[in-house]
Every structure is written in structure tokens, then in C-alpha cells.
Image: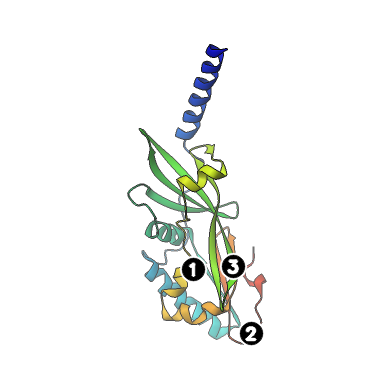
Amino acid sequence: MGVILLLVLLGLTAFVIDRALAAPDLGAAPGGRDDGESQQAIALTLGAQLIAELVAQPHGVVTLTEHDLTVLAAQHNPHPDRYHNVVARVRNNLIAVSANTAIGPMTVTVVAHIGVTLQQNGTAPQLAAGVMDVDVGALHLPGWLQDRLVGSPTIMLDPVFNSTAALSAVRANIECVVVAPDGVRVGVHRPGTTADPAVCGA
């Protein structure tokens, strides 16, 4: 029995290592419009676009592209000494943030699948991000291990709306957020206009 148990454990260990070292299927490289190479630059671009839309109509929608999300994820990397080559993509209505990291002698690709919701906290809506699933290579991690490996999300969308005067002025009127095929869409309405969550589309 001892020999059989040892063989089973060795086989299971080999399987786990093989799956962890496998390259995850992330698809094409991040795409979309380049709105800047820092959170501040992106906020300036989106703020100008949003103000122009709100002047013309009661509701406006801006989109954080995969390029923008990659910039934000890299800038808010909680452990730059541990996670390298941070990249963000939109996959299956979630933001897939991938990074290379070392686990012992192995270099693996960790992928955190992050959801974004609009929460009403106090007087201003908040764009909250939460880790839904974590993969190491082609290996899906259980929940208790996800928290130890990843911790807090690297995608921080809420600070974008505090980065410039234009976005700060309208952040209290955020009405929706949706992870769509072209990126993360955020809808805002004019003061005095009724919020319409449908403006973000799907």
C-alpha cells in the first residue's frame, strides 16, 4: 500500500507541475485604442471625451481598452518584484490579468480573472474590482490558495476617476459599468438626469 500511495502521489505531483507549467490560452495580444501610458494620461483622455459627450447629450460612455487596462494593471502591480510582464485582456465578460512569476525553481504564468461592479458607498458610486478565479498555467486554483497567491486585484478603476478635475466632477454621476468585448465601459449622466444603467450596453 505504501508503494502504491507513493506512486499515486508522484503521479499527482507530476500532473500538477505539468499543468502549472503549461502556457494558458489567452488569445490575441491586448488591443484597442491607446489612451496614454499612465493612469493620469488615460484619465485626461477619457475626461475630455466624456465631457464632450455630456455637453452633447444627457449620457456619456467611455471605454477603457485592453491597452488602457494593461497600463493600469502594471501601474497598480502590488508586487512588482514578484509579478512581471503584466498584461490585461477582456475574456468571457471578465478582465484576465496575466503575469509571470516564480514558484520555487519554476517560472509560471498566473492569470487572475477579475470582475467589476458598481457599488453605492456613501455619496459617490464606486467601481469595485474583485478576483473571481485564478489559474496557474492551465491549472485552476482553489479559492483558499487564490487569496494567498494573488491577494488584491491589480486592476484599480476607481482611482482613475479621481485623477483629473474633469472625471472627479462627474464621478458622483457614474451610472453603470460593463466588461464588454471592446473593454470596460463606464457610463455617466448629467447632473439632474435620471441614471440609466442600460447606456453601457453589453
Instruction: Please tell me whether residue 85 is drawn above or below residue 201 in the rendered image.
Output: above
Name the amino acid type tagged 3. Answer: Leu
* Direction bottom: furthest residue: 192
Residue at 39 percent across and 43 percent down: it is 100
User: In the image, 176: left or right of 50?
Assistant: right
How crowded is the residue under tag 3: few (<14 C-alpha within 10 Å), some, or many (20+)? Answer: some
Residue at 41 percent across and 69 percent down: it is 42
Name the amino acid type tagged 1. Answer: Asp
Q: Position of residue 202 (x, y in %)?
A: 64, 62
Residue 158 is marked as 1
Name the amino acid type tagged 2. Answer: Thr
Residue 193 is marked as 2
Tell me the CA gap for discs 2 and 1. 22 Å
Task: Check disc 3 and report the residue beneath it.
Answer: 118
Q: Sequence-wise, which precedes: disc 3 or disc 1?
A: 3
Tell me the CA gap for discs 2 and 3. 18 Å
Residue at 54 percent across and 85 percent down: it is 55
Disc 2 vs disc 1: which is toward the camera? 1
Task: Determine the secondary structure under disc 3.
Answer: strand
Q: Position of residue 47 (x, y in %)?
A: 46, 76
How crowded is the residue under tag 2: few (<14 C-alpha within 10 Å), some, or many (20+)? Answer: few
